[in-house]
Amino acid sequence: MVFIIPTIVLLFLSAESLLGPLWAMLVALLFPLALEIYSLSIGRKLSFMSVFAIVGILIIGAISLLGLSREWLALRRSVVYAVVALGLIIALHFKRDFVDRSLAKVVNMDLVHAAAQQKHVEKHLIRHINKMSYAFAGFLLVIGIVSYIVTIVFITAPTGTSEFNVQYAELRVLSLLFVTLPLLVGATGILLYLVSGIEKLTGVKTEEILKKKE
C-alpha cells in the first residue's frame, strides 16, 4: 500500500483538472510519511532506517516543491545505497561487532563462532565474513550508480509539473526491475555464498546456520 497508493495518486491525479501537480505530490508523499510516523507512535523503535525514510520523503517533497533539478532527485535516490555501503565499510574497520549483530538477525552467530573456535578457524571465518561484507558494500555502490543513471535518463520533465509527477511514478515502477530486483537477487546470492563458506569452515549445516523464523 505504501508503494501503490502514492504511485496511483501521481499517475492519475496530477492533471491540472484534478489535484494538480503540487497537491498530487503532497498527497503522495504525506501518505508514507504519515504511515511511518504512525508506526513509530504505536511503539515501533526509532531506527536509522526509519529516520532515513522520513528524511528521504521530505527531501523528495522539497526537490519537487522548490523546482530543483533532476540531478538532485537522482542523488537522493542513489545516496542511500552509498551511505549504507560507507557505513558498512566503516563498521568493518572501527566497530566489528556491529557486523556480527547485523548478521545475527539471519545467521546463528553464536553457534557459528563456537564451531569456528572449536575447529580453530576463527580467523578464517572473520576473513570470510569481511570479504562478503566488502562484496555487499561494493554491490550497494553499483546499485546506487544504476539508480542515479536510471533517474537521469528517465526523468526529463521539470520538477513541479504534472509530467514530472507521472514520470516519477513510472520511475518508481521501473526501479522495481532495474534496482529492487537486482538488489534482492544480489543480496540473496551474497548471503548464500557467505553461508556456504561458513558451512565449509565450521562444518555446521546450512539449516543450522540460518535462523528460522518464529
Image: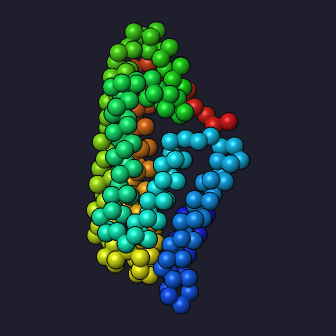
Image position, residue 93 (x, y; %)? 33, 25
Please report the residue visible at 37 percent of the width from the left and 72 percent of the height from the top.
67
Q: Position of residue 79 (x, y in %)?
A: 35, 51
Residue at figure coordinates x 34%, y 46% from the top left: 82
Q: Quadrant of the N terminus?
A: bottom right
Q: Residue at x 53, y 19 (%)?
A: 111
| Residue 106 in sight | yes
- 76 up-or-down from 141: above or below: below
Q: Observer-nearest residue: 138 or 106?
A: 138
| Residue 111 against residue 118 in the figure, above or below | below
Q: Nearer the viewer, residue 11 or 48?
A: 48
Q: Residue at x 33, y 58 (%)?
A: 75
Comparing 196 with 88, the one in front is: 88
Find residue 213 and report its image quarter.
Answer: top right
- How far across and down, in percent of the image, does residue 198 sit? 42, 25
- Residue 120 higher or lower than 106, as above or below: above
Total numbered badges shown on the rendered structure = 0
- Left or right? Give the position of 123 relative to 59: left
* Colouring convention used in this rendered image of the protein: rainbow
Relative to 58, 87 lies left or right: left
Q: Choose top left, top right, bottom left or bottom right for residue 121.
A: top left
Q: Nearer the viewer, residue 100 or 164?
A: 164
Task: Classify the position of the C terminus by image quarter.
Answer: top right
Q: Residue furthest front?
A: 66
- Residue 209 visible in the current orientation: no
Query: Looking at the image, which residue sits at the far right?
Result: 42
Q: Residue 205, percent across and down?
A: 50, 25
